[in-house]
Amino acid sequence: MNRTEDLLRRIAEALEAQAQASAVADWLSAPAYVWNGTAHPVGRIEAPDLALLRGIDRQKRTVTSNVARLAAGQAAHDMLLWGSRGMGKSALVRAAVAAAQGDGGAIALVQVTTDALTALTALFQQLAKVERNFLVFIDDLGFAEGDSVGPRHLRSWLDGGVEARPANVRLAVTSNRRAIIPRHGSEQDDPLNPRDAVDDTLALADRFGLSLGFHACSQDEFLDILRGYAAEYGLDLDEAEALEWSKRRGSRSGRTAWHFITELAGRAGKSLG
């Protein structure tokens, strides 16, 4: 695809997104929404109880406090949650909003599909007119190598651009990388300005008021997560079997722990719903 064709494709996508967004949703009727150019209300936020999210205590305190401030109409940060897969980044975002709603906070979660980033400006225009606070959630965000448009838009939405999110909206983004976009060793090979490319990449992450890392848990943390789930659902836990389960999957994480708990519940004839 040549540059002209790529430009025409982007224009067509933007026009389509604007056309889809012309119908304004009822932003007061639901606890959560999915935005893919139009709003789809969600009747219930699916999230674990905050007490079950273990091994991430510092991150949990920080995120829940920030979301509670947003729900109360106080100053709050945009958030970047980055790091290991399966360590509860997205679950924590959902659980924090659900907890704030349970405490009476005027807040809703709006999850944006990754193919609807071009329609974020239209979303912000709608939310700015609503007497409610919103956490706009972009899960597992990443940009393709060589994509300069997407990161530039995100920087604009976060800080100082004419398309910046309104005062009643904050962004929560999860990513496997702190810098969100791919980085390579060759970034430091420029003999004139060896830090320029690196600094430009990190400038995107630096736009977030909160940047929280999530790292693979230790064996003790993995077992602690399992003990919490087992106690919650009344399951008998064989810790040696649980460790063997994690070894076979090559991962100790909250997600791996949940998969093992699902296995135990199935054997016991129990539902986790």
Image (cartoon, rainbow, N blue to C red):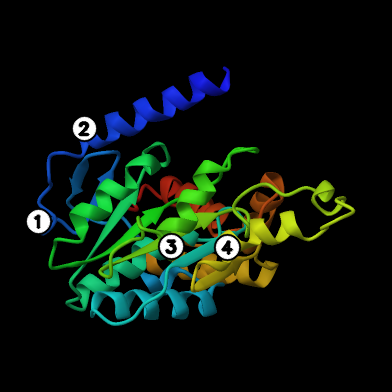
Disc 3 secondary structure class: helix
Q: Nearer the viewer, mark 4 or mark 3?
A: 3
Do tag 4 and tag 3 residues touch (Cβ < 8 Å)? no
First-in-chain label (1 vs 3):
1
User: Considering only order in the chain, which callout, 3 or 2, is on the residue closer to the N terminus?
Assistant: 2
Q: Secondary structure beneath disc 2?
A: helix
Count residues near mark 1 (Cα–Cα under 10 Å), then give few for <14, some for 14-19, many for 20+: few
Q: Which of labels 4 and 2 is toward the front?
A: 2
10 Å crowding of disc 3: few (<14), some (14-19), many (20+): many
Amino acid identity at mark 3:
Leu
Rendered location of residue 41, percent (x, y): 18, 47
Percent across and percent down for residue 34 are: 27, 46
From the image, tell me which residue sits under label 3: 158
Q: How crowded is mark 4: few (under 14 residues within 10 Å), some or many (20 or more)?
A: many
Q: Residue flagged by tag 2: what amino acid is it? A: Ala
Q: Name the residue under label 2.
A: 19
On the rendered structure, is 182 left or right of 224? right
Residue behind mark 1? 29
From mark 4 to mark 3, how far is it between C-alphas?
10 Å
Q: In this view, does 243 lie to the left or right of 166?
A: right
